[in-house]
Image (cartoon, rainbow, N blue to C red):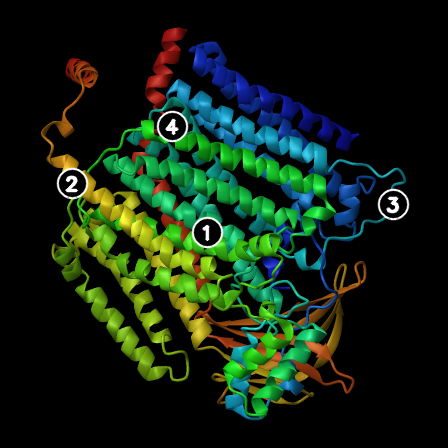
Amino acid sequence: MKRIAFVLLLALSWPSSLSAAVQPDEILTNPTLETRARALSQQLRCMVCQNESIDESDAPLARDLRVLVRERLQAGDSDAQVLDFLVARYGEFVLLKPRLSWRTAALWGLPPGLLLTGIALLVIGARRRRGRAQEPDAAKLTAAEEAQLRRILAEGGGS
Amino acid sequence: MIAELGHYALMLALGLALIQATMPIVGTRTNDAVLMSMAAPTALAQFAFVAMAFTALATCYVISDFSVLNVFENSNSQMPFIYRLTSIWGNHEGSMMLWVSILAFFGALVAVFGNNLPAALKANALAIQGWIAAAFHLFILTTSNPFGRIPQAPFEGRDLNPILQDPGLAFHPPLLYLGYVGFSIAFSFAIAALLEGRIDAAWARWVRPWVLGAWMCLTLGIAGGSYWAYYELGWGGFWFWDPVENASLMPWLAGTALLHSAVVMEKRGALKVWTILLAIITFSLSLIGTFLVRSGVLTSVHAFATDPMRGVFILAILVVFIGGALALYGWRAPLLKQGGLFAPISREGALVFNNLFLTTACATVFVGTLYPLALEALTGQKISVGPPFFNATFGPLFIPLMVVMPFGPLMGWKRGDLLGAAQRLLAAAILAALAMAAAFALKQGGPVLAPFGAGIAVFVMAGAVTDIVERTLFLRVPFRAALRRAVGLPRSAWGTAFAHFGLGVTLLGIVAATAWGSERIAEVKVGDTLEIAHYRLTFAGLFNRQGPNYRDMVGRFVVRRMNGDLIGVMEPSRRSFPSRNMTTTEAALMTRGVSQLYLSLGDPMQNSNVAVRLYFKPQVLLIWFGAMIMFAGGALSLSDRRLRVGAPQPAKARMALRAAE
């Protein structure tokens, strides 16, 4: 449902209702636990929806997962334990931020890798250019360019 | 009859596009001026026929001709006029028509206003435009024809999807497409330059207005989409890192990089090869944005299987244009001469830094969006890449960019003075530090990083102001002299300052609204009061209201200050559309300064209570105001004398005409 703004770019298939996610009766009375539950919910995918966290989704499954997360927290689980529990049950697919593994190495490695490669290329390029700049005839014009320059200057002087 | 005329006009446009695509290129190869000069008139004629086709489709929508399948599926005679019109592009076929119409329009603009272009460059660029147009016309005619008829015309249409029955549909898609398609001009010029094997600083001057215009439209289009999502969704989010959004963000990031590298190329003749590559990448991402989203492949690899013809065609277009362009680049780019030396600490250096981080950010979004698809296709394993990933990767890439941004305009070309720039930014830095300290002191509870974000935002804004102050010598020379200098300043300098300032404003809005907002989710009965920030909302009851083609269940809430002063009434509703049996949430927004109260209704309960979600979004409007300021910056830059002087020379042309007589 989040894709409404850009929906026209999409095939139009919408669920029949657009009510919001977390319902009043789900909210825990302990505010610290509730805050943790909300933070966790935002990292968990509603698996029957398109790219929505269970915190945003109004699908019944998302509701079940929200309640489950809160139950685990009330039972005294740490955040990591809750995530482990859900991954064990539903697989990596449930995590909106994939864990680092061989399968996701390219995903996580690309941003820093690309940045470092870019910096390296720039440094090498700058070195090479500086080297070239010291060569005496680097800035010299070719004969054709000289002729063209003379022509342009002559034209410019004439007007 | 009208639909058939439109269909026929589109076929003729395809024919014209093919002529436009081939003859001028043959002309440039054989040095035949006549063939080359065919480019402009065919581009104009092609535009005329595409416009005719689009008008035909629009007419079918306006008169509600339900014998046309596309109109039947997406329109309804009960809809207000404006939605009947906008529903043209509220579906796949119609939006493709909009795309080609804009493409043909831009082609016609190049044909008309490109008189000062070298003949070969103009011919080649228009020919490339012809190739793009031909591919799209063929795509529409073979797989997405909007003019198909139904044998037995129904009395009433199925109605436009209710979510799209919103003024947002009138602005958002056309703006996005203006942006996407605008980059096609840069692409065509890049390919034309590669075909010629020659490129110079003047190239950047011709291309920059197009890139700038496309960038402005895309900026506004993305911001508009974000605001639309914000008020339509019912829970006040404004950016979701959804693949569909990412598809529009990627061309924006690449386009922003292109805009900056084109400046270097124009002023200093450097970064030519890189600028060409960026032009290709930017339009490629626009194509991917248009198509991947359209084909539905982003949601699932299997969407391809449901409509193989369309999917394969899309893939073919992507492969031919992107692959072809990159291959041509790999072959011809080494021929282009590099030029313009500069020290690492210089204006060019800062712009290279900008390009490095923008393209990395763009690549990050690209990989994050497509990785799950690729992994599933290759290994069958399913993973999710969602907002937490993008926040963790995109943020760290954008922060250095924002910190360095104010330094760029203060540095000289070729060799900059970092220390001097830092000294001039001292006031901005102090202001940022104060803002940071104030945020730490006043706003407890939000994320620890939020005050830093606010500080950076203030630094960017103050840095943009510093740039103008430095250039006008404000406070150092008499006020009138400074004013005169301000008026005399190149518009592009103002444009830079505005655009940078706007980005700071947007960042401030994002930080404040996400970090310091508050939220109440509750079930209320009549007479209950909710408190949020410094407001109290009392639930006054539910009532029904009939709209033109929907029915609202409205909740009425009275808003007061804490001391009891009445401010106003908020009326969120749940809107049901009988034609599609759908319900949408219509949130109520109350603007207080640049902050907003946001209230939406949940499902009604059995006991006549109602679930509500209430948010206080501090400074949230800054997000979109910032985008508008960026747009204004682009407009100022576009009006710069330099870009106009480079363009047509009417006086000379007129004289030449008289001589011919």
Q: Which residue is mark 1?
A: B219
Residue B341: % across, % down: 19, 38
Q: Give the position of the C terminus of chain B as an image quadrant.
A: top left
Q: Quadrant of residue A125?
A: top left
Q: In what quadrant of the picture does the N terminus of chain B appear?
A: top right
Whether B213 is drawn above or below A119: the answer is above
Q: Chain of mark 3?
A: B
Chain under disc 4: B
Q: Residues within 10 Å of mark 2 (few under 14, many from 20)?
A: some
Q: Which residue is mark 3?
A: B154
Q: Residue B80, relative to residue B518: is it above or below? A: above
Amino acid type, callout 4: Arg
Which residue was labeled with disc 2? A130
Q: Secondary structure at mark 2?
A: helix
Residue designated by label 4: B332
x, y percentage for residue B456?
A: 31, 67
Disc 2 versus disc 4: distance between alpha carbons?
25 Å
Gap in Å between the C-alphas at discs 1 and 4? Answer: 32 Å
Task: Measure the C-alpha gap from mark 3 to mark 2.
Answer: 74 Å
Which of disc 3 and disc 4 is earlier in sequence? 3
- Amino acid type assigned to the residue bearing label 1 in the image: Thr
Q: Amino acid at mark 3?
A: Pro
